[in-house]
Amino acid sequence: MRRDTGIGIGLLVFCAVLYWQAGRVSAPPFVPIGPAFYPRAVLILLAGLALWLIAEDLLRGRAAARKAAKPAGPAPNYRKALLGFGLFLAYIAGMSLVGYPVATFLFVLALSWAIGPRSVRELPKLVAIAAATVLATYLVFEKYLYVFLPQGRLF
Amino acid sequence: MEVLFTAVWALLEPRMLLSLCAGILAGIVGGAIPGITITMTIILALPFTFGMPSLQGLATMIGVYVGGSAGGLISACLLGIPGTPSAIATTFDGFPMARKGQPGRAVWLGIWASCLGGLLAGIPLIIGATQLAYLALNFGPWEYFSLFILTLSIVASLAEQSLVKGLIASALGLLVTSFGTDPLMAIPRLTFGWEFLRMGFPFLPILIGVFGLSQIMSDLEKSGAHGGASGFGRDADMKVSHPAVIREILAQPVNLIRSTLVGLWIGILPAVGGSAANILAYDQAKKASRYPEKFGTGVSEGIVASESSNNANVGGSLITMMAFGIPGDAVTAVMLGALIIHGIQPGPTFVVSNTAIAYGMFAAYFLAHPLMVILEWLFLRFALRAVRLPQHILAPIVLVLCVIGSYALNNIIENVWTFFIFGVLGYLMVKTGFPLAPLILGVILGDLIETNYIRAVMTDSDWTQFFRRPWSGAMLALAVLSFCFSLRQRRRAAKRADAHPAAEGDVEF
């Protein structure tokens, strides 16, 4: 299955689920347009557009896909992006557990190590940067701007 | 005029001036660092403005916007890498001029052209925003509904790669506002019984996720691409005769005014942005030149066209935002969010009922330009050093600031989850060729479209009013025209592409 066709089918399923969910909203009587009207109108529009996307993709044909040149420049390093997303997810999840300072220190250190040159000589510099980031943001936001940064269950 | 002078006077207060200068400096540095766009810089500046009075916060943001629009030229001229998409065309002549041994001339031509273009656009900003706001005061819910539909149709039509993908992105944005309580009766909908969805998705974490997280992750994929950039470092000789540079710019008045008008017009169009303005202005300058073949070899006309247009674009974007409450681009979308946080409702009543803040914004725009020149003169060496910051140091710090920006909105961790969810969505959209601007505009306009449609139908159940009322009908006709025009253009482009296949470009943020 081609990519845009897959996206179109996914959107149709998504629209169907939300359309069903929108129908579960209880509308008050004597109101000409209930709260379900707008999401349902948008979902019908979105489903129509998804069909257009599928049709366009199928009509374009395989020959056109083959004809398209590859983008210029180096090949994207998806592993790094995936690693970034993984570490970031762990960071947000961990923040509720260990609190902002510890989670942020570990996240900055882990991400800069993971996407950097990974040299042991670089490590003290990365530790210093992680500590400085925590300290600077803590002082500016918590002490100066009164933004109470997330507390963890452990710390 | 008196209100404007009062506003200028208010901005000269040390606290205000300091915030404006800090914003400009942050904009210059952020704009100069390849990979950090103006949108990203303004997102990072956002949490710092939460605790400030409204005008001080908005002045800081205008400073970031003006500074960022001019900051991108530093790396464009000295590294050959545009610091922001709005400095792409500056690279074409700025870098060759620097390589010819005139890095100072290249950079300062850009800085002075940015200043002059921005100041020239300030006059239409004041007149345009005020007059359009008075015009919009006569609008009823029919006209607002049609205006928002027109805006969405323009933005979706301008999506670079595919019209249907632009429209899908808009519809997704409209759908996002359906989650949580409905805007008129506060009845929860599409919550799946989940408390997290009951209040809906707040706008700013969505914006930060879509533009911030997705961009950083996309940059991680390309890491190493900028690392080996050749060019000039902090040892570059930046000495230049400023009167000579200004004379050189003023010697090309037609180029300066034309590029300013191009930037202004592109800025007024919703969600197009400086990246289109600088390329269009450069193209126009080249077409009008007596020696177009020299463009790309280091001619001053190219730098002046690109830089005056991208700063004039700031003025244009502010016109649309202040007159109608519609963002001219992603940066003004953040400003709209900031206005709401400070309890100010954007829209046509903004200029009329918040005169002090509106004129304060005009004054900040005017003051920001000369201050930008002074700060570039003082801190150019610092900006050159920042340009060389490695990505593995920069990316984690930027992400931490994005998390704080989302969290600080109302100190709840759910906002950070919203930021993450929309960051992933934004990344997937970029990877599959869906534009991000229509999504954000859909999120901004979703509630407004719903509210105005229901108000219109409740006022008069005759739906033909949407077509029969002159302004409303004209705007809906324009929306259809814009859609048909875009369809026709794409068919032509597709035919041309069949004949000469070309590589697909990057999706713009």
Image: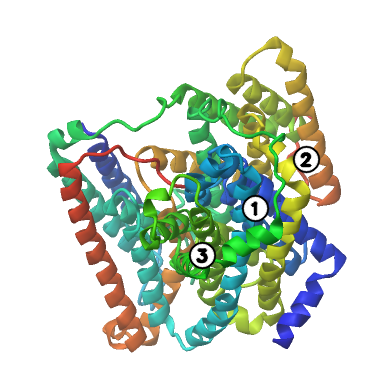
Instruction: For label 1, count other residues whose C-alpha is less than 10 Å away and answer few (under 14), some (14-19) or many (20+).
Output: many
Of the residues under marks 3 and 1, which one precedes in the sequence? Answer: 1
In the visual, does A128 lie left or right of B319?
right
Q: Are marks 3 and 1 in one subunit? A: yes
Q: Is residue B419 at all visible to an observer of this figure?
A: no
Looking at the image, which residue is at 16% across and 43% down? B498
Instruction: Give the SS element for disc 2.
Output: helix
Q: Mark 2 sits on what residue?
A: A137
In the visual, does B351 lie left or right of B296?
right
* Marking on residue B327: 3
Residue B278 horizontal/vertical position (percent): 47, 56
Q: Are marks 2 and 1 in one subunit? A: no
Chain under callout 2: A
Instruction: Give the SS element for disc 1.
Output: helix
Q: Are marks 3 and 1 in contact (CB under 8 Å)?
A: no
Whole-number angstrom distance, CA of label 2 to CA of label 3:
30 Å
Residue B228 horizontal/vertical position (percent): 56, 25
Q: Are marks 2 and 3 in one subunit? A: no
Tell which of B417 and B392 is nearer to you: B392
Chain under callout 1: B
In the visual, does B337 lie left or right of B197?
right
Name the kind of residue labelled 2 in the image. Thr
Q: Classify B272 as above or below B132.
A: above
Q: Mark 1 sits on what residue?
A: B108
Q: Classify B91 as above or below A42.
A: above
